[in-house]
């Protein structure tokens, strides 16, 4: 019998299968497609997050000139950003996994049944796979990992184009993390949910421009985002000349945390690992995968270990109490972002990105301990204009339960 079955071959599944293989466990993978099938998404990450892990070589593009635009002006970020070479990263993890005899199967995991010593997964085609432990890495829409049903799921949505344009849509060699300027909208549109442009110079006359809704319930439609992207470009006198790739993005930002008592372990979108206030997750996968793999290997190695105990120890390694508490603080942040009106939102981001870089970077990467994150947020409160402070204080009344879980759980 295999030790672990990893279901899903996105960044979460491939990275964890490779890390598990490296621990010496017998690992199998199951995915809808060939695991070498190219991933559809572009993945951005801050360069220092990769530097800390020694993985900078997987960047395809890097930008030193990174900025945010709000209506009152431009905020320089003083931090280097990059786009991952997704094909190279995927190939790297597949090679690593292969080196450790991880074998991949194709099929749709449909049904899961737990026994005292193992778990059995049945595919839509009726094939069965057994392993001592099953990891669900099937993404944000996962149906294997159990969690509470969210009353209101907020979604990040984006519509992007990689292509050529009549004029550069950003300054050459620049990355615009968020351009919230709304001068291109009609007065009526300014009352609709805010969106921003994420854009970058890819070199050789190619640019990536993506109109993005950071988070909204219900999701802003891709049609609206597409229409806004073109309206924004037209307003600046820019024509789309050539489209090389279209990116469509939609995923939940506040998926409830999984039930940590279940026998299936999650990783990636399936384990609610997306940062609720930013939508980023790749850095978290890279930082947390090896630790999770080691915890699983240690648990399965113990002679007294039952699969239920191994799953419990794995969940504990992935979501220790301190991380859960920070997660609720980020969820509180998300609720604030969605409740702000446009001027508040612009003032908030101007204040947030004017914090010491280490503070906002630590918040976004979830790399700081809870007291440090709280300290940074107090710093933000001190720096923010009164209208933003008022918005934050209102949220304490409407979403104080999230702060309660941060401070008391
Ligand atoms: C368009 C887009 C852009 C993004 N950009 C960024 C970014 O720049 N930076 C960042 O940090 N994050 C980004 N994210 C967020 C997040 O990092 C991605 O969603 C990431 O792809 C999630 O990884 P995952 O492996 O958990 O899930 P996925 O990438 O969704 O992979 C899931 C895998 O599971 C397989 N699968 C699904 N169901 C089954 C089943 N029943 N049986 C077997 N296999 C199954 C799928 O075929 C797939 O292989 C982006 C998300 C999107 C949608």
Image (cartoon, grey):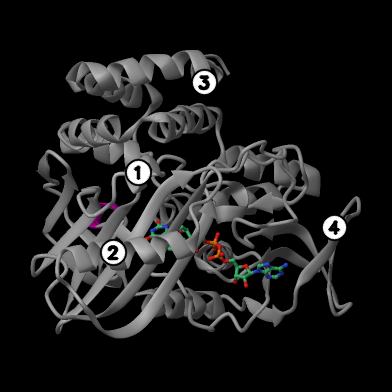
Depth order, front residue of 61/233: 233
Q: Which of marks 2 and 3 is in front?
A: 2
For the C terminus, give its image quadrant: top right
Depth order, front residue of 138/315: 138
Label 2 to label 1: alpha-carbon separation: 32 Å
Whether tag 4 and tag 3 are in contact, CB under 8 A, the answer is no
Side of 317 relative to 172 (left or right): right
Which region of the structure is painted magenta? 47-51
N-terminal of the two: label 2 or label 4? 4
- The residue indicated by pointer 3 is 399
Residue at screen point 19% across, 63% down:
235
Q: Residues within 10 Å of mark 1 (few under 14, many from 20)?
A: some
Label 2 to label 3: alpha-carbon separation: 35 Å
- The residue indicated by pointer 1 is 365
Depth order, front residue of 11/100: 11
Whether tag 3 and tag 1 are in contact, CB under 8 A, the answer is no
Q: Which of marks 3 and 1 is in front?
A: 3
N-terminal of the two: label 2 or label 3? 2
Q: What element carries label 3?
A: loop
Instruction: Tell me the tag on residue 231.
Output: 2
């Amino acid at each position: 019998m295999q030790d672990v079955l990893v279901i899903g071959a996105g960044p979460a599944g491939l990275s964890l299968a490779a890390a598990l293989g490296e621990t010496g466990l017998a690992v199998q993978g199951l995915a809808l497609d060939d695991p070498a099938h190219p991933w559809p998404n572009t993945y951005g990450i801050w360069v220092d997050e990769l530097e800390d892990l020694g993985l900078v070589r997987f960047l395809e593009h890097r930008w030193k000139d990174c900025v945010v635009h709000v209506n009152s002006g431009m905020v320089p970020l003083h931090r280097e950003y990059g786009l991952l070479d997704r094909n190279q990263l995927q190939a790297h993890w597949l090679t690593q996994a292969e080196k450790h005899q991880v074998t991949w199967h194709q099929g749709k995991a449909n049904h899961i049944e737990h026994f005292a010593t193992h778990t059995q997964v049945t595919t839509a085609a009726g094939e069965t796979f057994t392993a001592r432990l099953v990891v669900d890495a099937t993404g944000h829409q996962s149906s294997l990992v159990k969690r509470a049903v969210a009353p209101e799921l907020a979604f990040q949505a984006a519509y992007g184009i990689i292509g050529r344009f009549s004029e550069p849509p950003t300054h050459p060699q620049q990355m615009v993390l968020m351009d919230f300027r709304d001068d291109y909208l009609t007065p009526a549109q300014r009352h609709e949910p805010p969106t921003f442009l994420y854009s970058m110079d890819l070199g050789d006359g190619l640019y990536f421009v993506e109109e993005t809704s950071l988070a909204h319930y219900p999701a802003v439609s891709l049609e609206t985002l597409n229409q806004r992207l073109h309206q924004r470009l037209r307003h600046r006198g820019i024509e789309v000349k050539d489209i090389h790739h279209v990116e469509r993005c939609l995923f939940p930002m506040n998926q409830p945390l999984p039930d940590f008592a279940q026998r299936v372990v999650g990783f990636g979108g399936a384990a609610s690992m997306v940062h609720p206030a930013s939508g980023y997750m790749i850095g978290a996968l890279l930082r947390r995968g090896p630790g999770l793999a080691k915890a699983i290997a240690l648990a399965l190695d113990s002679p007294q270990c039952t699969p239920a105990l191994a799953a419990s120890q794995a969940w504990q390694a992935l979501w220790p109490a301190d991380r859960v508490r920070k997660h609720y603080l980020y969820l509180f942040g998300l609720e604030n972002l969605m409740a702000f009106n446009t001027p508040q939102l612009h003032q908030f981001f101007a204040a947030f990105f004017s914090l010491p870089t280490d503070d906002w970077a630590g918040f976004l990467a979830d790399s700081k301990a809870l007291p440090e994150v709280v300290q940074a947020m107090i710093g933000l409160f001190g720096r923010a204009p009164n209208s933003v402070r008022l918005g934050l204080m209102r949220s304490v009344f409407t979403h104080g339960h999230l702060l309660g879980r941060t401070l008391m759980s």
